[in-house]
Image: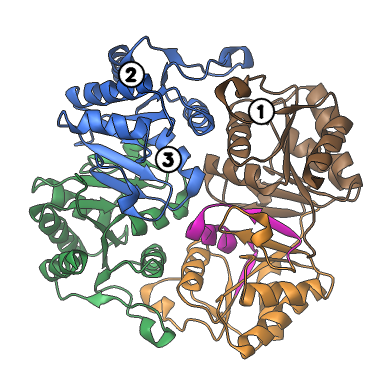
Chain colours: A brown, B blue, C green, D orange
Amino acid sequence: MTRKISISVIGGGDITTDEALIAEEVGKEIALNNATLICGGLGGVMYYAAKGAKEHGGLTIGILPGNAPDDCNDFIDVPIVTGLGHARNVIVASSGDAVIAIGGKLGTLSEISFALIQNKPVIGINTWNIDFKSKGCNGIILAKDAKDAVKKALKVISK
Amino acid sequence: MTRKISISVIGGGDITTDEALIAEEVGKEIALNNATLICGGLGGVMYYAAKGAKEHGGLTIGILPGNAPDDCNDFIDVPIVTGLGHARNVIVASSGDAVIAIGGKLGTLSEISFALIQNKPVIGINTWNIDFKSKGCNGIILAKDAKDAVKKALKVISK
Amino acid sequence: MTRKISISVIGGGDITTDEALIAEEVGKEIALNNATLICGGLGGVMYYAAKGAKEHGGLTIGILPGNAPDDCNDFIDVPIVTGLGHARNVIVASSGDAVIAIGGKLGTLSEISFALIQNKPVIGINTWNIDFKSKGCNGIILAKDAKDAVKKALKVISK
Amino acid sequence: MTRKISISVIGGGDITTDEALIAEEVGKEIALNNATLICGGLGGVMYYAAKGAKEHGGLTIGILPGNAPDDCNDFIDVPIVTGLGHARNVIVASSGDAVIAIGGKLGTLSEISFALIQNKPVIGINTWNIDFKSKGCNGIILAKDAKDAVKKALKVISK
């Protein structure tokens, strides 16, 4: 098998400076650990995570909602063109061996839901704080920072 | 225009007796108000909502995740066969003029997320209790029972 | 089971007068035979098929590529809002118990392909003339006119 | 922009020895020209194209219909997990800057249709021989062998 480990990074398109720094460091850590970064290919968390990965020699995949490959941000190696609109969130959530969520709003929440439905590990940094377990659902693994998030993602993947 | 008002009813496949009763009454109220019921076409809330609607002369549409039209429950007039798996949740959330959520777990949460992203009104009965507004997102309209939920759905649609 | 027989009608958005007449008569025959009409919900063949069905008391479902229910034509009872762009063609092809193709270009060809993959009967009127069987694939059942097409569709469904 | 050129290779899962050789050489030529190979990630043409690319240092992406990343063949670097069934064909057709079709049956025909709808160049080797232009549609560029196909794909992309 030549298949590489991949990690999906999800979060808002409209973000704070702090979230940008975290996303960039998450991308960097993913690259330094030889994993592929998968994201939604656009701005905000997607942009900074791809930037961090790309600047450290990583491979970056952007799963786009629209029809134009050039809509992807400047740090995406391979745009996947879905034309599916919001439904592309399912693919972002499903394609990583683990998912790291940074902040985020409703799109991120839909991705967290889809990842958890599929028993995919989700590591969260300052993201939706929801008591999933009281509903009998899988929950999110909390991380304190970017390094901790990628470390925890790799640990659950290797199990 | 011959287009009818339609309401999507979402919720778990594995439900309590209380949720079944609520779903059935929601379906009944939708039918009595001449609206079309849209749901995921399978069991649990989808089954009882379709039963309630069908037994009161309503029209019922089931948007199925799989490839077999006969997978739909016994109270669906028209199965829509998507073959899209979990991604069919986007279509359930998008096709109603309003969405009523009864209980539910992660699939329901993904549908609530997609509906709110699209500024679709979501009325909730004993469903996810999340502080959407603290994230700057649209929130859920709470309803106390089935009748109240359908009344509130029709009211926001008619605006 | 309350589930009704449904027939998907596919064909171009930009059509000839002759195709419009055929589409309208196909819609009429579907309605007179108590089947549900499923189509892509927009113009051309979709418009005239829905018009024919609706003017003869039929039920019409339009599976839309975009996000706005009001994009559907004036003869659609229930718009299904997918937001999936071209991928909604899979759902149109999959949701009818049989598919009737009238003329059409590449979108229609994609729908014929998807229907045949799923062993769905496809009845064609002046549509793509392709030697499917030389490839070892299922082929299209040819019909000479609208009445013949609906008759053949109902016959294969009832088998 | 770090974005690389990518080429989608499509064709049957059940193929002849000749088609396997062509697919493998197409994959090799894609890799030698520093383009990314995109395919459906499974067997037949997808397997041999990925093998050819991978054995010559290329990058390979497999867009899977199912939910399990490990369903991909042994020469895929990055499985994209869609869970969309046949609808994933739209993504395969949309994600390459050009599409090369080798033989193939109905799935391939659906992908050719989707690529041509989007004005994507399609290069064909022993694939569907359809008179698209008589329908006023874009047609396929014919290639005599693997090398010729990749050369023609790169030429139309660079325009």
Up-down: is A15 above or below A36? above
Q: Mark 1 belongs to which subunit? A: A
**Which marked residue is nearer to the observer: mark 3 or mark 1?**
1
Near mark 3 (Cα within 10 A), the count class, few <14, some 14-19 or many ≥20, is many
Image coords of residue C149 (percent x, y): 17, 69
Q: Mark 3 belongs to which subunit? A: B
- The quadrant the N terminus of chain B occupies is top left
Up-down: is B91 above or below C92? above
Residue appearing at x 64%, y 63% in the figure: D96
In the drawing, what numbered circle is on residue A139?
A: 1
Left or right of B32 on screen, residue B135: right
**Dot placed on the residue nearer the N-terminal end, 2 or 3:** 3
Residue picked out by circle 3: B91
Observer-nearest residue: A46 or B92?
Answer: B92
Distance from Cα at disc 2 to Cα at disc 3: 18 Å
Distance from Cα at disc 2 to Cα at disc 1: 31 Å
- Location of residue C96 by image quarter: bottom left
